Structure formats: C-alpha cells, structure tokens
Image (cartoon, rainbow, N blue to C red):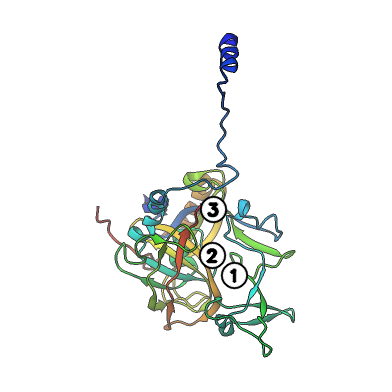
Amino acid sequence: MISRILRNLMLGASIYSLTAVGAVAMPYVNDRVMDSGLTILDSEADRIDICTQEPTTYTEATSTYSKGSKDHGAAGTAFGTVGDRTPTGRKVSSTAVTDGTISGAGTVTHWAVTDVTNSRLLAAGALSASKVVASGDTWSLASFDIGIADAS
Amino acid sequence: MEIQNKEGGIVEIDGRVRIDPGPRVLTAVATLELLDDAVTARHYRAPFKRIATVGDLAVTIVRDGDSYIVGDGSGDELRDTRGNLIEVTQYTVDALGTPIVLGESITYVDWRSKWRNGGPGAVWNVYSLEDPDGPAGELLPVWRKKGTFDTPALAMSAATTIAVELAGTPAPKDPTPRRRSRK
C-alpha cells in the first residue's frame, strides 16, 4: 500500500477525497426528477378545500377544518401539466375555482389539495388573506402555482 | 367492533371513530432561527418589507399603527403623490392563520420532521364522526378531533374507548369524499 502511494505521488497522480454537499446545499436536480414529484399533483389531485387552519391529515383537510370545497370530480383535473417556473425550476398551476361550495360558517385561512381516491393530503398552504364564510355561499380561488426551484 | 384499514393509512372503528397519522403541530416563539429554511422549509416566513402593489389595496389591515397585513402583491406597484414607491410589511400566517410576528408565539406544523410511515415526528390523531348540529354550524357531519397521541397503541386505546361510548347510537353519514380507484 505504502509503495503504491509513493508511486502515485512520484507519478503526480491525485488521490481524491469526495464529499457530497447535499446536506448543506440544494443539489442540481434534473427536470425529470422535479417533474416526477410535481406530476403527482397533475395526475392525482382532484379536490381543493378551504380550511379554518392548516390541516395535517386528509381527515382534517376534507372535514375537520374544511369549510368549503371544490371537487373536480376526477384525478388529473385540479392541476395542469408540469412546466417551467420563473425564475428557475418547474411548477404546476392549479385549475381556477369559480364555483366552490361552502359547507359551514367560519373564517378560512388555508387551502388544502387532496387525492380523494387514495385519501391523501398532497399540499397545503395559507390563503393570501383570511375570509369569513357562511353556509350556502360559493367561493372562488384564482389559479396558483406549486413549484420547485433550481439549485441556487 | 369492526376495525378497518383505509386508504392513506387511516384506521376506522365502526365507521364512527378514525385514526389518521400526520406530523406534529408545535407552538414556539417566532425567531429568525425557527423560521430558517432549514427548520421550517420555507413554509413559514418572518415579516419582510416589499413594495406595495395594487393587489394590496383589496386587503390592507392596519397593525400596530404603522405596519400592514397586505394583499396578494399582484398588479402594478403603488406610488405616493410624489411618485415615490410605497413600502409595506408583508406578514405571512402560522398554522392557525395568525400573522407571524417575531418574538410572539406561533403554531406551526413540523412538516420537515420524518413523520411519514410512523417516523419519529409522527403523531396519531383520533377523530369522532359527529352530527351536523354542532357549535360550528356545519351543514355536513364532521370528523371532529378528539386527541393526538404519540404512538398508534395509545391512539387505538383512546379510539376504542370512544367507539364503545358511541356504540348503539345512530351514526351520522360519513362526509368523507370517496372515489373508486381506476387501477
């Protein structure tokens, strides 16, 4: 072993010690990898709820904290296909909601995207402003993006 | 007593009591360290300054006299009568919808923990299906949260107790949306 190291040094050969930096910096991620994650929203999401707080489970998103919903009726209808995100990365855009129904009175602060077929909470986030809603009302939600940025 | 394993890791007892695992909900004082991307994955943010836009006009709430909870930031930039850009403070909200203010308590979901598949950050939530004539005035029956537990065994014990109490009473219609898999 020692003789091999000495020979390498004499020949000017390098011995590389490689360490991945993934733990401290976002690595490069190919578009195909990002798309596979976002494609779940495109292909499986089918319902959006508006909630009184941020849900942590499917049950909370669709019932416990839900005050209104829009069931798009079939998987693959709540989001469009994956595309480029500005300034970097990839994204999917939600289908705008114009006729969501309100199922109970309260103040909604968050939205939740679910996959009804598999009972999965796929994404959740805050609304830009809270809104007081009443039973029997309808609600709308402009299209919004969910994306992944490139490494910075 | 009938126990069913449902899609998404949900367990139901008699269709009246449900266990649904998820991440832990935590309360802490908002600090820049807590709101760092490494801790909260950019999901919660400290207040920050930005230029006011037309979209802010729709939702502007005065806070502490000189700060604002502003709207969606869309549209053209706003200027004062001298043509200067107007700067506002953008607040985001915590898991309860409360504006995040540094130094004040916030409630947040520990999405970043390894809660999936029963990992160390997971909790098991127990829900009971209740009638629509509840205090919140829901039109539909609702799965109301009864407790959060650190292990599935503790959750099952609590859920079983609730199921026994509810046995023999008429069950509300389950409001959970259902759709058959096309596989």
Q: Quadrant of residue A59?
A: bottom left
Residue B97, numbered label: 1
- Circles 1 and 2, Cβ within 8 Å, touching? The answer is yes
Q: Total label count?
A: 3
Say if residue B1 shows up in the picture.
no
The amino acid type of the residue labelled 3 equals Pro
Is tag 1's residue or tag 3's residue first in the polypeptide sequence?
3
Q: Position of residue A10 (x, y in %)?
A: 59, 15
Quarter of the image for residue B172 reads bottom left
The answer for which chain carries disc 3 is B
Tell whether A97 sits left or right of B137.
Answer: left
* Location of mark 2 (residue): A54
The residue under label 3 is B23
Q: Check the image and name the residue furthest to the top.
A: A3
Q: Tell me which residue sits at (30%, 68%) in the image.
A: A73
Rendered image: mark on residue B116? none
Q: Secondary structure at mark 3?
A: strand
Q: Position of residue A119 (x, y in %)?
A: 38, 57
Q: Given the image, on which type of amino acid does mark 2 rest? A: Glu
Q: Tell me whether the residue at label 1 lies in contact with that at label 3, contact meaning CB atoms closer than 8 angstroms.
A: no
In the image, A113 versus A89, the foreground residue is A89
Q: Is residue A72 left or right of residue A102?
A: left
Chain on which label 1 sits: B
Name the chain under label 2.
Answer: A
